[in-house]
Amino acid sequence: LKIVKPYSRGSREWKPLEEFARALGVPLETIAREPVALAPRRGAPYMEVYDLAGLPEPLREYLYSPLTPGDFVGILEPAKSFKPSLLLGALLAAKCGLIRCIKVTVEGEKFFLYGKLVYEDKIVEWKPGLAPVVGDDGEFLGWGFGREHKIGRRRLRLVEPVWDLGWYLRRGG
Amino acid sequence: MPEREYSKLSRILALARERVDGWIMRVASRYGYAPYMISRYLEALGSRDSVVALLEANEEPMPETIRCNDHLIDCQHLKELLEGKGYELERIPFLPHGFHVTRVGVGSIGATHEYLKGYYYIQDPASMSIVYSLDPRPGETVADFAAAPGGKSTQILQLMKDTGFLVAIEKNPRRIRSLRSNLARMRFRSYAIILADATKVELPIAFDRVLVDAPSTGEGIIRKDPKRKTSRAPEDLAHIHEIQYAMLERALDSVRPGGIVVYSACTLAPEEGELVVDRILSSREDVEVEHHGLIAEPGVVEYFGEKLDEMVSRCGRFWPHVHGTDGFFVCRLRRVEN
């Protein structure tokens, strides 16, 4: 790893992360107290964002060699978008009373974890846009995107999986 | 004896080839093994009956076992959840978080929602027991010297209650994918993954404990990989022994005085177990072997006429025909003030 970019407030390349925090209604510190972006390999079209807050001091000197230095927060495509990690989702889901989350039924959970759309009657709580999705028991299931679809006069609410826990299985271990 | 004069291994491997009699040839042919392996089993086990019992046990498929992640879920609750889906689980008496899957429900045990949520890890009982011997405590600084795919790293963090810090070292970039995935799936945070060769790694930390679950020739997992009966030559044992020795040496240099190193390998080969430890004991003054605290059988102290350091008897071996597990070697070493 040769490219390390510490967070700089308001800079163009960190804008997607700031926008993500704003859309979720949380301060950036809730996402990461000490964000840093690392290139996963030379020439990669994206950066991986980590929170270094928990990394012991002596290991910070070795920031070029650790592959996962601290909490993996998500993927940053400079000046385009920020894709939050499953770990971040699990941490944020614990704050579901404070931030808005999507909640699905037990049956909805099955659909969601198999990467399928979840429809109206399988949704307990819904919000538009990107949000952590939790099951009926409040357990984090992944990131979903709340959409409204208009069919005639009726508005159908649905949740589209963005990055669900089923990924651990589908990616092959 | 200085390390450079360690010559027991070559003498032993030469004898393993030479001491092949008619009975060994017949048994090797019946069970499909390279004859030198049978001669080594006879030497380590001491009787023909035990050798046959081992070979028979190696013909049986491994039962599925899981380790409950009590960092995320109460183990009894996990049992109830899975039993509600048609699985049947039985506690493994000598493993606090271990369960045998005695009946499979709908689909594979590796494809349930509970698995995706990180509530458990599929792991052999012998492999699971190694981390209990390491006994990591909350708040400590620990290293795992061959961390992928993450079975033992996740278990270390589980026992540390995700406090302190784990440095997970892995040499193979491809295997880091599964390591990262398992650590994230089981929702641990107090770790860093470092891409490095554990035989050479130098970190600015004196660890409280280090786990060296060394790469091996796989002689302990013939039940999963029957090709191993013939796929390796004695030279492979000599080659892997050098890597294992270098990793253990490095690990001992990395712990603080008083710190613990657990050396393990999924192997039945004394060349990859007792001989590695014996070589360490013959080359260093600052190491003691402690009892591993597991149900394992004592280490082999005499092999093809070579007497090993008495302390090696405190190491442990899991035998498939005795414990019903994979074959495994474990040894708990303490670095003492020199």
Image (spheres, coloured by chain):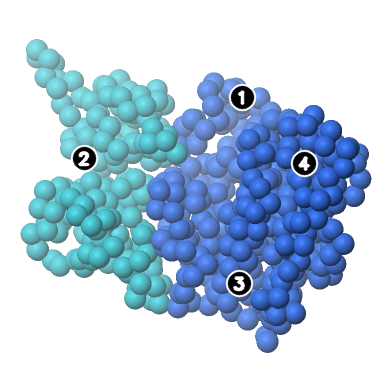
Chain colours: A cyan, B blue
Measured along the vertical axis of the image, is residue B176 above or below residue B310?
Answer: above
Q: Earlier in the sequence, mark 3 or mark 1?
A: 1
Measured along the vertical axis of the image, is residue B251 above or below residue A129?
Answer: below
Crowdedness of circle 3 by 10 Å Cα count: few (<14), some, many (20+)?
many
- Between marks 3 and 1 in the image, the one whose residue lies nearer the viewer: 3
| Mark identifier at residue B35 | 4
| Mark identifier at residue B291 | none
Are the residues tagged 3 and 2 within 8 Å (C-beta)?
no
* Residue B95 in sight: no
Looking at this view, is B310 or A123 the one in front? B310
Which residue corresponds to mark 3?
Answer: B249
Residue at image x 13%, y 66%? A9
- Between marks 2 and 4 in the image, the one whose residue lies nearer the viewer: 4
Q: Horizontal and vertical percent for residue A66?
A: 37, 64
Secondary element type, mark 1: loop
Residue at image x 55%, y 49%? B151
Left or right: B33, with B52 as reference point: left
Secondary element type, mark 3: helix
Crowdedness of circle 1 by 10 Å Cα count: few (<14), some, many (20+)?
some
Q: Horizontal and vertical percent for residue B249?
A: 61, 72
Tag 3 and tag 1 share a subunit: yes
The image quarter in which residue B100 lies: top right
Looking at this view, is B34 or A50 the one in front? B34
Which residue corresponds to mark 2?
Answer: A130
Are the residues tagged 1 and 2 within 8 Å (C-beta)?
no
Which residue corresponds to mark 1?
Answer: B104
Tag 2 and tag 4 share a subunit: no
Inspect the image, locate mark 2, and give the three-letter code of the amino acid beneath it.
Leu
Crowdedness of circle 4 by 10 Å Cα count: few (<14), some, many (20+)?
many
Are the residues tagged 4 and 1 within 8 Å (C-beta)?
no
Inspect the image, locate mark 4, and give the three-letter code of the amino acid beneath it.
Pro
